[in-house]
Amino acid sequence: MTLRRATPADAATLADIQVRTWLFTYSEYVDPERILETAEGRDERWSEILARDPRTIVAEAGGQIGGFVSWGDARDSDVGDGVGELFAIYVAPEAQGAGVGTALHAAVIDELRADGHREATLWVFERNAHARDFYERSGWTPDTGPYDAMRWNWAPSVRYRRGL
């Protein structure tokens, strides 16, 4: 497996992985129609993101992207200075369980540190037990800060935090 910075040429693949993972992971508690509505234009959105901000890494194996991670400065105003945020980590359903998520997570922790952050946050759906277990095994703890009852208006979410 190779990790590299994503480029705008990867936008369609990232959109595909993100939407397929949403459907695979969230469809038990998020209406698939809402997911598909949000998916419209996702490749253009990724093109815009990657053109202006290179803080996305992809994991490739055998010439195929199996997952990606994206990060930046924390978007929540209550977290204080020096805090970064893990915006997204997605592993294609067929690549799950092969160490892709673990490799991407290690890379994003290094990148957040390199960006000068001392702590980081992330948001995860409350019912996403698989992701919550992964984050907790990786040193994240539920934050006692604000609870977002309907992150993205899809499902109740909880914020996690960890020191870097």
Image (spheres, helix red, strand yellow):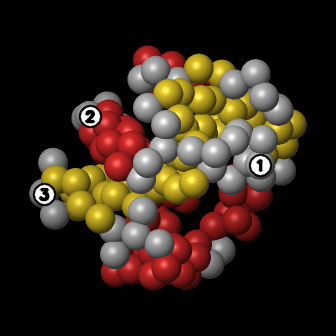
Q: Is residue 77 left or right of residue 162?
A: right
Q: Mark 1 points at which residue?
A: 77
What x and y, as percent, mark residue 58? 31, 58
Mark 1 crowdedness (10 Å alpha carbons): few <14, some 14-19, many ≥20:
few
Determine which quarter of the picture holds residue 105: top left
Tag on residue 27? none
Disc 2 on helix, strand or loop?
A: loop
- For the residues labelled 2 and 1, the Cα–Cα distance comes to 33 Å
Which mark sits nearer the N-terminus, 3 or 1?
3
* Amino acid type at mark 2: Gly
Q: Which residue is drawn at 59% across and 20% down?
A: 141
> In the rendered image, is residue 159 in sight?
yes
Name the front one of labels 3 and 1: 1
Towards the viewer: 17 or 148: 148
Q: Residue at x 51, y 19 (%)?
A: 136
Quarter of the image that includes the C terminus = top left
What x and y, as percent, mark residue 157? 75, 35
Q: Name the residue under label 3.
A: 62
Determine which quarter of the picture holds residue 41: bottom right
Towards the viewer: 8 or 20: 8
Name the front one of labels 3 and 2: 2
* Amino acid type at mark 3: Gly
* Amino acid type at mark 1: Ser
Towards the viewer: 12 or 159: 159
- Does 12 sit above or below residue 73? below
- For the residues labelled 3 and 2, the Cα–Cα distance comes to 15 Å
